[in-house]
Image (cartoon, rainbow, N blue to C red):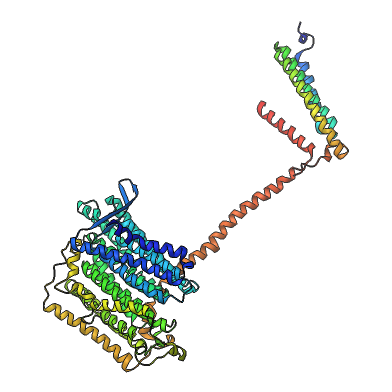
Amino acid sequence: MNILEQVGIENYITLSALLFCIGAFGLLYRRNAIIMFMSIEIMLNAVNLLLVAFSSYHEDPSGQVFVFFTMAVAAAEVAVGLAILVSVFRNIGNIDIDNLKNLKG
Amino acid sequence: MNTTILLLLFTPLVGFLINTFFGKSLGKSISGVIGTAAIVVSFLCTISLFSQINTDGKEITFHLADWFSIGSIQVNFSFLFDQLSVLWLLFVTGIGALIHLYSISYMHEDENMHKFFSYLNLFVFFMIALVAGSNLLIMFIGWEGVGLCSYLLIGFWYKNQDYNDAAKKAFIMNRIGDLGFLIGIFILGFHFQTLEFLEIKDLLGKDLITPSLLSIAALCLFIGACGKSAQLPLATWLPDAMAGPTPVSALIHAATMVTAGIFMITRMNFLFDLTAEIQNVIAIVGAITAIVAASIGLVQNDIKKVLAYSTVSQLGLMFLALGLGAYEVAVFHVITHAFFKACLFLGSGSVIHALHGEQDMKNMGGLRKVMPITFWTMMISTLAISGIFPFSGFWSKDEILMTAFHNNIPLWIVGSIASIMTAFYMFRLMYLTFFNDFRGTEEQKHHLHESPSLITLPLIILAILSFFGGIISLPGHSWLNEYLSPLFSKVAQEEHSFGTTEYVLMAIATIGAIIGIAIAYKKYLKDNTIPSEDAEITGVSKVLYNKYYVDEAYDALFVKPTNVLSSFFRDSVETSLSALVFGLGKVTNEIALQGKKVHNGSVGLYLFAFILGVIAIITYLFL
């Protein structure tokens, strides 16, 4: 039986939108690179959740397959991102993005 | 026969190449000998060609190579040897050889003697191309080439800025004429689809071109001739061209190059015969040039300037003859003029040589005793140019005046007055230079000497030619007219019967010349007048001495306005244009400087902008 009969699709959409906004505000609000990174992950997973929900709703499994790919790519991205952060920390001693001013024009 | 023609055409070029590339290492004498030998070879080849054409009367067309073809116009490197071109080559190479010989001695002091000879050889090469070319374009190559050599040789002593200016003036004045010549060539080429002289001659009867366009073409060609042959209003370059070494003045600016315009008109006589109004223009321009130049010559004090104005004046007389359709008469005068004017210039060179560069007749005098050969040869030429019986100039000038008398009395009067003036200023030159006492410095007097034999030999030959040159075309029995008759349609101009009128005209011309000489005799020999200093000249003489202020008028009319316009463009237009360009640059720079502040390196701000952007895009797409 379809899981959507127990919890309606609109709840998934609301949750996913909430999660996305939390992630976005976290990204804008915090200055610690790790936290910002986590916020990005929240946004990513909000989208994943939505994908899965709509996949069930349309009874089309390709959406769920797509989520696996997204997660794999996200894992790779996290690995690279964390490596960059480690490198930044080694160079300037913290990971506050306000200290990363080398792109100043 | 082909070998002869190739030798004739290319030995001067070979001489030029040798002197250009090896002249300096060969040494002065050898480079001079090579230069002279090249021209002598050409001269000998010309003699052989001449004797052939004189006997069988057939023209030779020599095809050297194809050049190019556009549409149906085919232009080749081909050469036409007929009565006219061979005759012309004969005196070009002949006098050229004599002047080369003269230059060996005259230029021996100069460090760039090899350069001088290479230029002279190149000049003769281009002159041969000009004369022998069988189509207008080959003629034009020669035409431009002699102009180039003229420029190089006028400015030969390039360390003197005045000489460089004179060279530039000659070149620019010639360019104006050349433009006319080119337009003429274009018109003819476009309508006849050929540039060959003989083909154009055949096609002229076929109505391929409207009469008015034909007149324009003829006028354009005449403008070209005006530039090269120093006719008004393009005459002012020739007197200045005397800045070059004297052999150059003799060869290029008296005997050969400046007669190229006359050659061209004679070559295209079939065209000018059809355009009577242009012939009138030619005759009038010639007559005006003759009298204006002669009047300027009356008061000049520089020995070469006098001869230069006399050249312009004589060229004017030749154009007068051309305009009256008497081409063979013009050719006759070209030949005798080449003899006596070359002799006069070389003689003046001999005088200048003896006085170490002094050209002002105020500082000469009494040279008759120290330089007898120069004096006598110049005297013969002077008698010839003044038109005294039986010297060559008498016959040729008299024929011109006679033709003028039969066609147009006012032109005859103008021509006669010009001739009287000629007699006057030439004897003025002779008296001031050779008679009375020497007026130069003691040191100059000490060094006075007759020139070496390499200088006097050409003088003697040319003096002999100036004396006897007239026999080629005596009235009533003219070898020249018969020789040239295949070229001209009008069968040598209704041969005037030689009667009382002609004798009277001859008498008038001779009396006129004698009057001119008598005035000069009275003023400069008897009264021993010496021309006054530049500042003291007044009245009409001042106008004449300053050449009717033509140079000043050109300066005011063309040079000054051009300068004003140039400074206007430089100071106003260019400044505002560059202000505009710089202004645009400044604006861009300012915008960039402001925009730079946005890129402050704050990652947070970038993220904020990024998200705002995404929101904006989504809003735009979905709402």
**In the image, what residue occupies the spot 16% across and 63% down?**
B490
Q: Could you say which quadrant of the image residue B384 lies in?
A: bottom left
**Residue B393: x and y, percent?**
24, 77
* Picture mark count: 0
Q: Which of B444/A8 is in front?
A: B444
**Residue B134: x and y, percent?**
29, 57
- Horizontal placement of B499 versus B238: left or right? left
Q: Which of B143/A48 is in front?
A: B143
Q: Residue furthest top?
A: A1
**In the image, what residue occupies the spot 26% across and 74% down?**
B336
Q: Could you say which quadrant of the image residue A11 lies in?
A: top right
- Horizontal placement of B362 versus A101: left or right? left
Q: Which of B105/B178 is in front?
A: B105
Residue B523 visible, this angle: yes
Q: Residue furthest bottom?
A: B527
Residue B45 drawn above or below residue B29: above
- Quarter that holds the C terminus of chain B: top right
**Residue B125: x and y, percent?**
36, 63
Residue B310 visible, this angle: no
Q: Could you say which quadrant of the image residue B227 lies in?
A: bottom left
- Quarter that holds the N terminus of chain B: bottom left
**In the image, what residue occupies the spot 78% across and 9% down?**
A3
**Residue B577: x and y, percent?**
56, 56
